[in-house]
Amino acid sequence: MILTVTPNPAVDHTIHFDEPLQTGVVHRTDDAVFTAGGKGINVAKYVSALDADATASGFLGGHFGKFVRDRLDADGIASDFVTIDADTRLNTTVLAEDGEYKLNHNGPQIRPADVDELVETAQANEPDTLLVGGSLPPGMSLSDVDRLARAGDWQIAVDMGGEYLAELDADYYVCKPNRSELAAATGRTVETEADAVEAAEELHARGFEYVLASLGADGALLVTDSEVLSAPALDVEVVDTVGAGDAVMSGFLAAREHGLSDADALRMGVLTAARVVGVAGTRVPHLEDVLTNEMHVEVTTVRTR
Ligand SMILES: O=P(O)(O)OC[C@@]1(O)O[C@H](CO)[C@@H](O)[C@@H]1O
């Protein structure tokens, strides 16, 4: 079972305008979607839709926390959250004619006792894989993530920002940086595929067994102990990119739960992302054909190591 820990969940509010945003103007629209979000929660939703066993955990509080919990229950996603005495945040994505605006709140204050309860919750669930996804709310530190990594007999995956990846200390199973996170984690300039390979290999050498780099329109890379694999992005219609990185991680983890190879895990990550960018916000698209690879993704070996 995969336990996903979202230290900083959110109600994701995705709102769409057919005009550019302007200051001093009240923009109005009928097109708004509210979903339960936060990177780990998204992974639990997508992994469950890929027929793998997942439970969502993390911190929830207040009305938005209740919204997230109720929405997961309604969608049949197993969950085991720590209730906090503060309000879960609301994150807004504005899709306007002039682009995609992401407005994220830093989140509620977490107390040391909340972190202790989170560690106990993780231990009680006895997952094979524990994923920590997204930003850390005020009061939670990277040493708490290392503590979670070491608190049980699980492999630990992280879907966190590059500045976080640079500081983590424990041994990790897999991380999933995007291009700017690769740069932030390594201090390198990451423009070409060769730059991305070198930065991902550096992270691998620092203790990440797998480095799954999502490169947007340039697809994704997977660095393993023995090779570097590459998969192109699919040519699909993009509604918005929210959740795309979480989808790459979800495809990878679900494939591993299904006992698939490294190449198939990379393939399933790219396929899942291709579906997720086609729906608004972090709604779960239909993913049945991802399991059967009907969209066909060609994985190539960039180099053996
Ligand atoms: O502020 P963070 O934790 O870095 O990111 C949170 C978030 O923007 O990421 C997800 C998409 O990846 C959304 O569901 C969520 O609102």
Image (cartoon, rainbow, N blue to C red):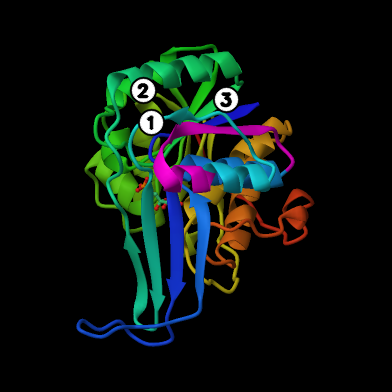
Q: Determine whether 223 is above or below 269 in the image.
A: above
Q: Is residue 177 left or right of residue 299?
A: left
Q: Are marks 3 and 1 in contact (CB under 8 Å)?
A: no
- Mark 2 neighbour density, 10 Å: few (under 14) some (14–19) many (20 or more): some
Q: Is residue 298 left or right of residue 143?
A: right
Q: Determine whether 206 is above or below 52 in the image.
A: above
Q: Earlier in the sequence, mark 1 or mark 2?
A: 1
| Residue underneath mark 3 | 129
Foreground residue among 272 and 233: 272
| Residue underneath mark 1 | 84
Q: Are marks 1 and 2 in contact (CB under 8 Å)?
A: yes
- Residue type for callout 2: Asp
- Residue type for callout 1: Ile
Coordinates of residue 68 in the picture (x, y in percent): 51, 46
Q: Is residue 110 left or right of residue 227?
A: left
At horizontal 45% and vertical 66% (from top left) the residue drawn is: 14
Q: Is mark 3 within 8 Å of ligand 1?
A: no
Foreground residue among 191 and 146: 146
The quarter holding residue 260 reads: top right
- Residue type for callout 3: Thr
- Mark 3 neighbour density, 10 Å: few (under 14) some (14–19) many (20 or more): many
| Residue underneath mark 2 | 114
Q: Is residue 174 visible?
A: no
Q: Specify start and end residues of the magenta stretch as a single range.
A: 51-68
Give the label, 3 or 2, closer to the camera.
Answer: 2
Give the label, 1 or 2, closer to the camera.
Answer: 1
